[in-house]
Image (cartoon, coloured by chain):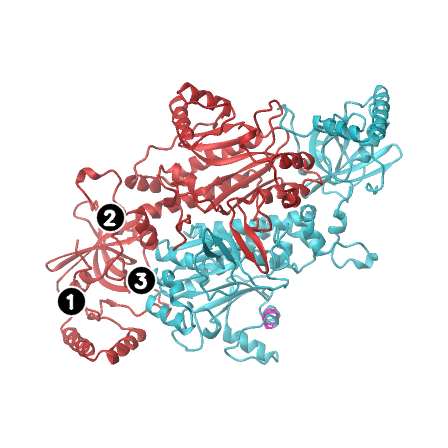
Chain colours: A red, B cyan
């Protein structure tokens, strides 16, 4: 692999069509630095001399800035469709220069487009000049190029590329957008499988370097795959709920009062007043239920001003929220949620097979397991399993993160599932609006859902009776004035209802068996990171 | 129609099953007020006496608060499925008491569930007591009831209900959640068609009263329909783009710098620092393009701190955003956008026929017209049409709102379409990142899109060259430090790309021919409204 950062590269290569902009800039530069200008003009003269004897002079070079100058009838191919069926055809592809390797009079290139890569080769010959091969070998990695080539059967499988059976013999090569010579890190370093240290010490790219240069980091096949899985989760979530009669809604993010006591909430200046960023769409989902929408879902930004610097907390994340009126029992809602997750997991396994295995190549993980129907355990059963495993925990104690993980392992051992619903949490550890269990003073009609031992959803039957809601809010010491409009929304008849909120990034992280939520947030926000 | 607010209603009606809560509350009350307690106990005694001779005593009353007490195998029907095929069957439905009218020994009820209504009737007879009929006629409107009844053929079409061919003969009637007696306004007033003043002066509900009581307002069949149309717009937008290979992304709403000069941006306290709410996901969409996602869309909250109190501005709205790399010309992107809107409009006409006609009943509007393919005019052509109509406007002037509306009317007259794309805006009126027209110093590769003469989308080819972008930003007087990460994201190769942002609420408002954007925002936010 050529180290492109250290190799010389002619600024105005032969065959280059310079943009007005570049010319203007050059002129400016010339005024400032007479000596440099002389060198430049000398280079240009040399280039002109070379042109005269360059058989390929119209077949390579840097294109002017793409400004929608013209429309042609050229047909473009995508790298992913280049296979044996195309052998002999001339194709035009646009891609990034993923790698290049010059050997004598030849140059091997790898072109990349999203998760797909193809090898191309150019060699000095009757129709290919030395200058063209030199140009090809000097294009900086990550530049975007247009390559016209003939599809040829590969002499042997090209294991380094996604398109293994064919390669392109270059006829034309133009650079559309040039990368700077020095990348913040190499993509191959960012794509190195975890736990491959047996091959000797290798360069790795740490998380902050990745995130500081997210534009480059996101180009890895792994990241291309991760965010396609994330998109699929949203799609499957919506599709399942839509078939079940749910209506999509959009709830305001700027709210007038910090509903749950004011902790962990971001303040916003709202004209001359003060406002807050919603920590959850819950109150609005519930109002939609009181307003007769019956079953609703919403996908949107959720804000938590928690100073938590862990592998699973973000200050802004994407909430997949749903709320549903039920007839008799909130287990009707638990069933819908359980079936929805099954639809998501099955959908991912069907539609994202390639993406999942791409991610696994860099981040090996056990395949995600789940039961049909979904496993539902009671909190009491969970506590009993933990105690049987030697944990000292009281009936009404909340689950610590280590205990959640331990319980996840115990459940996996006993039931062989990475997904389960833990029902009937102690009332004491849940918010004021949670409906108490009618048959017990300890428990409540609430549930958390776990993937690989980590919480990804919290939900409950909500109190729909305004008097009782007032009583419970008072019990929790909440300022009734601040939640007046919330309570008032149940004064004109409200059906019993339940729902919950899911963290998208957590679902994606845990389904894929990743170890940090920043891997599944496109541009993560945490207490220490607000850029890019 | 009984005026339920003024009629007496027994707190503890015959047949009522009182909740523990209610009993406890009553006991408290009793201590405070001995006299009232005596009256109460007298009433209870009377109720007990009535019970003894009430043949229907187990067939009606207020249910205890629904707390998921039990699961039964009862089968529930939905009002929308009640039709002639069900005549003779006994069904159980839950709905709101939409209306009731007592006449002597009979009571007519109308039950509502979302957009569907059915009539029910109860009359004193061998199995129905006077007390039961009295109970039925005294349930407050908007209360949620469970009604068990026999489906009967209606003697004549019931024109006031969505289910016109059948009615329910009540066997049992229980109240699940009681409304307060006094509604902020009557639903029939909120549903009265606009422009029906010929029937004499009638009560109307003004916008602020509606929004202050949005929970009630949203229950009208019109609002139930509007927000189903809005959900369909999102669904059709996503489905079309997904079939075109777009990937859904989620961009951060909290950003570190107010990118476009800092005007109209909400400030957020971010831990010990300062941050802002994103006015658009544009910079992040573009970064996704620079990060190889090729074609992306995102639906999410967009924030504008504009002190605009008009019929079409909100401080928080839902943006439907897309961005796409193209090969040669940004018209490739315009074509996708045009085709996408056609797919949305056709989809709405197919999937939301009922909803559209429901909305039209209250808010009459001409059917929305569009052409296939979408009409694309140049800015220059638009200016010429305006001048021909007598408007004094310069080549590089921006379009005022009245001129946009006028142009919309002129286009409708000439081309018979409510939808068109206005291409090639003057460079001077567009943001710094807009790509100039390569063939003219006046124009740019940018476009706005209009529905019924109002702007619903703005977009452009963006500058993907970091040097040129720097030059344009400087020209616009923008602090380069503030947009450093934006500019830097194009330093490692970026394909030419274009995109745009659509206001969901505007598309919904204008497709349906509504006159105020607050009608298509579930819980609108404007400079004067931050609640509910």
The x and y percentages for residue B436 are: 41, 72
- Residue at the disc numbered 1: A131
Asked whether B358 falls inside the magenta stretch, the response is no
Q: Secondary structure at mark 2?
A: helix
Residue found at x 20% / y 69%: A13
- The image shows residue A58, relative to residue A278, as above or below, that is below
Q: Residues within 10 Å of mark 1 (few under 14, many from 20)?
A: many
The subunit letter for the residue under badge 2 reads A
Asked whether the beta carbons under mark 1 and mark 2 sit within 8 Å of each other, the answer is no
The x and y percentages for residue B394 are: 53, 80
- The image shows residue A300, relative to residue B18, as above or below, that is below
The x and y percentages for residue A103 are: 12, 56
- Residue at the disc numbered 3: B491
Determine if residue B429 is in view: yes
- The image shows residue A319, relative to residue B462, as above or below, that is above
Residue found at x 65% / y 58%: B514
Q: Both on one chain, marks 2 and 3?
A: no
- Residue at the disc numbered 2: A189
The subunit letter for the residue under badge 1 reads A
Query: Which span of residues is magenta-colored?
Result: B403-408
Report the side of B357 relative to A147 (left or right): right
Residues at marks 2 and 3, CA–CA distance in whole angstroms: 20 Å
């Amino acid at each position: 692999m050529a180290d492109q950062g250290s190799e010389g590269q002619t600024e105005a290569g032969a065959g280059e069509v310079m943009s007005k902009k570049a010319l203007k800039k050059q002129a400016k530069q010339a005024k400032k630095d007479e000596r440099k200008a002389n060198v430049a003009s000398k280079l240009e003269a040399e280039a002109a001399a070379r042109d005269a004897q360059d058989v390929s002079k119209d077949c390579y070079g840097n294109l002017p800035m793409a400004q929608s100058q013209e429309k042609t009838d050229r047909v473009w191919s995508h790298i992913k469709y280049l296979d044996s069926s195309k052998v002999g055809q001339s194709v035009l592809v646009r891609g990034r220069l993923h790698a290049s390797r010059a050997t004598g009079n030849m140059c091997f290139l790898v072109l990349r487009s999203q998760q797909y890569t193809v090898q191309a080769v150019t060699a000095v010959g009757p129709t290919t000049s030395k200058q063209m091969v030199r140009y090809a070998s000097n294009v900086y990695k990550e530049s975007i190029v247009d390559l016209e080539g003939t599809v040829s059967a590969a002499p042997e499988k090209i294991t380094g590329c996604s398109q293994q059976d064919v390669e392109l013999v270059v006829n034309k090569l133009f650079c559309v957008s040039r990368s700077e010579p020095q990348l913040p890190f190499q993509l191959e370093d960012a794509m190195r499988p975890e736990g491959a240290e047996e091959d000797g010490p290798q360069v790795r790219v740490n998380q902050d370097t990745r995130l500081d240069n997210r534009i480059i980091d996101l180009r890895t096949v792994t990241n291309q795959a991760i965010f396609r899985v994330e998109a699929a989760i949203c799609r499957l979530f919506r599709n399942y709920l839509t078939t079940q009669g749910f209506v999509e809604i959009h709830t305001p993010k700027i709210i007038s009062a910090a509903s749950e006591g004011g902790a962990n909430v971001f303040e916003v200046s709202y004209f001359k007043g003060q406002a807050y960023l919603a920590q959850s769409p819950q109150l609005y989902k519930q109002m939609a239920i009181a307003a007769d929408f019956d079953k609703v879902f919403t996908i949107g930004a959720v804000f938590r001003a928690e100073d938590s610097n862990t592998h699973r907390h973000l200050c802004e994340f994407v909430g997949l929220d749903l709320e549903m009126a039920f007839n008799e029992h909130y287990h009707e809602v638990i069933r819908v949620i359980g079936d929805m997750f099954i639809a998501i997991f099955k959908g991912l396994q069907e539609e994202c097979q390639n993406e999942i295995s791409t991610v696994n190549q860099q981040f090996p993980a056990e395949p995600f397991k789940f039961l049909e129907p979904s496993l539902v355990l009671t909190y009491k059963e969970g506590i009993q399993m933990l105690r049987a495993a030697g944990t000292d925990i009281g009936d009404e104690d909340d689950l610590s993160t280590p205990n959640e993980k331990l319980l996840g392992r115990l459940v996996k051992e006993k039931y062989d599932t990475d997904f389960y619903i833990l029902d009937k949490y102690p009332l004491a550890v849940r918010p004021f609006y949670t409906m108490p269990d009618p048959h017990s003073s300890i428990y409540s009609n609430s549930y958390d859902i776990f993937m690989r031992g980590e919480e990804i959803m919290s939900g409950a039957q909500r109190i729909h009776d305004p008097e009782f809601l007032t009583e419970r809010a008072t019990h929790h010491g909440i300022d009734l004035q601040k939640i007046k409009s919330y309570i008032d929304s149940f004064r004109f008849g409200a059906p019993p209802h339940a729902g919950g909120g899911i963290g998208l990034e957590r679902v994606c992280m845990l389904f894929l068996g990743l170890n940090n939520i920043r891997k599944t947030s496109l541009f993560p926000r945490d207490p220490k990171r607000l850029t890019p």
